[in-house]
Structure formats: structure tokens, C-alpha cells
Amino acid sequence: MKKLELKKPVSNCYQFMAFPLSIMENYAPSYEWIYSNFIQTCFDLNFHSSPVPFYFYIYDYTISPFLHTQKLNREFLSANQLNIIQLVENSIDDGHYIYLNLDEFYVPKRHFLGKEHFSHDVLIYGNDRKTKEIYLYGFDENLQMAQTVISYDDFELAYNSVGNIDAWANYIHLYKTNEEGTFHLDRNIITEQISEYLNGSNSSQRFAALRQPWDRAYGIDFYKHISAYFNSCEKNNIPVDVKIFHFLYEHKFIMKQRIEYMFGKNMISDETLLEKLDGIVNDSVGIRNAILRGKLTKVYKYESLEKSLMKLQNDEICVLTKIVENIKKL
């Protein structure tokens, strides 16, 4: 039996980013890279049809100085007559985690087990050759990030079935911690990104030579569209997406951690900023919990939610502006 290490990630809203974070965060120096990123956000105005309506703007979630990443696909394995079980065994032996999609109809401890064919991403972090079991990490049937087990036979069924229900899920990514990776927190990068967030700048324009820029609402401009989002949910009788507001909380919480870290490194001198960030985090938790209550009762207090969000916006603009000013002074 061999299990590779996992750490609870700073962001678990979406698995595609939670998985790389859960690997690299085992290596302490990675936090200087994490705190230099994960600042700018983007909100898809096609919110009801978007698989990821609101999240950090990230050019490529597989790129980090603290990860070795190899990208394969299912056709490559098939064309080279490579067995998926052998790939898992050999990859784990070599210290590689495996990221791919499975059909949850065959995956124990998943919401769709035995009910519906549904493609979902998972992270493989270990296996046992004697018991013929594979260890998975991902959202369980209670939507909690958990470590679960699947037999070799069920794994093969789940892997092979994906090809029949999800043509998009062709990828297989191998991740391995790069303990020789280095990155030093750069206050200029941080102030630049916070400024982009405050200005609602389209950060994807930076990568226009590599990928078509995304048409999204960036940074603080998220708040401009929240009324339209709530109106659309109410008009079309669509439940509010809890993930949008869980991510809202995650964004504020990571900002608080970032500034605490910088304060400890004497990159920020105003301790009152930490108290103000505490208030912002608490307010974002309150908004998320109000959304959860609405989901349970099927009654959303939209007017109250909008007022809370406008207050959060104003508080955030105030504290982030002061943070930029404080960093530039030192």
C-alpha cells in the first residue's frame, strides 16, 4: 500500500484547483507563490450555463513552480496499449498523483453511485496492490472533500464509461511535488493584482498572445452584476448557486491569510488592516450562510442579501486601497 500526502487546500470550491493546491501545500515554500497569486477574480455573465461562474482568474491551473506536471489523454493510452491500472500503479510508485474523470455511477461514496451516469474529476493519491484498491480524493456524497476507496474493477468500469458520456473529459494529468521549486513573494506583483481587482481590469488581456481573452466581469465589478443575478434566479425559479458565495468567502479568507503573512514579514505595518479584514471575512461567511438557509427553506431574502453585498463591496474597496497604500510606503 502506498499513499501520497495531501493537505487541506486554501481553496476547495472547485476541485480542478483544490487538487494541485492540496499537493503543493505540503511544501511550505509554496505559500509565497500562493500568496502572490489568487487575487484577481472573474464572474461569467452567462452565470446559469457556466460550469465555473465565479472563481479566481488563473491562466493555467496546472502551472506552478512547485509542481511537475505531465499532460496525457485517454487516446494516448489507448493508442499505445497502456493499461490504466498499470498507469496508476506506476505513477503512484514514482510519486505522481493522477487527475482524471470517472463516471460516478461506479464510484463508492459519490452522490450518483448507482443512480445516474455522471462524469466528475477525481485525484488519485494512492493504491494497494494486495487488496486491489485505489485511493481517491474529491467531493463525496455529502459534498465534503474526502478520501475514499474504489476497487480496481469498479475503477476500470468508471474510467471506461466516461468515454461514452463526456467527450470533454479526455485529459489525464500527472502531478508531482517539485521540492526544488523556488518563488519569493513579490510585493509589487501583489499590489499590481490588487489594483487590477479594484479597477475591474481584464487580467486575461495579459495573455492575449497565448489565448483569446475572456469576456467576464473582473474583480470588484462582480458586485455590479449581483442584482441581475438574483433577479434572474427569482424570475426563472432557479436556486442560488451556493458555490458563488462560498468562493466569495474563500477569496476574502485567502486575502486575510496573505496580509497576515505579509505583516509577519514586515511588508505591511498597519495592524488595523488585519482587524478590518476579519470583519470582511465574517461578513462574507454571513452572506454564504444566508444563501445556505435560503437553499434549505427555498426562500431567499434578496433585498437583505443585496444590502449586505453592497456593504461588503464598500468595505473591501476601502481596506484593499489602504493595503496597497501601506505596501507602497515600505
Image (cartoon, rainbow, N blue to C red):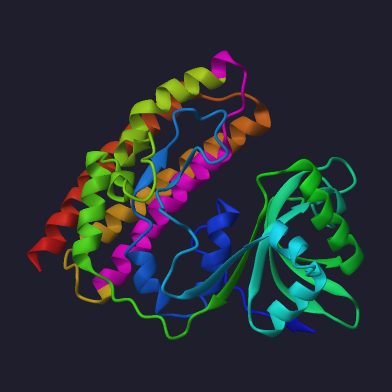
The quarter in which the N terminus is drawn is: bottom right
User: Which residue does the image show at 66% across and 28% down from the upper left?
Assistant: 297
Residue furthest to the top: 235
Q: Is residue 95 above or below residue 238?
A: below
Using the image as rendered, state which of residue 257 and residue 116 is in the foreground.
116
Q: Is residue 280 above or below residue 303?
A: below
* Viewer can see residue 139: no
Instruction: Tell me where residue 265 appears, x and y as whole percent.
Output: 24, 77
Provide the residue span drawn in magenta. 234-263
User: Which residue does the image show at 75% across and 67% down from the upper left?
Assistant: 80
Residue furthest to the left: 329
User: Which residue does the image show at 39% across and 39% down from the upper left?
Assistant: 214
User: Would you say 220 lies left or right of 137 here?
Assistant: left
Using the image as rendered, state which of residue 212 and residue 79 is in the foreground.
79
Q: What secondary structure characterizes most of the magenta part?
A: helix
Instruction: Tell me where residue 240 appears, x and y as whole percent.
Output: 57, 30
Q: Is residue 297 above or below residue 40?
A: above
Q: Is residue 174 above or below residue 2?
A: above
Instruction: Tell me where residue 37 appears, x and y as whole percent.
Output: 35, 60
Q: Is residue 6 magenta?
A: no
User: Would you say 52 lies left or right of 64 here?
Assistant: right
User: Would you say 37 lies left or right of 85 here?
Assistant: left
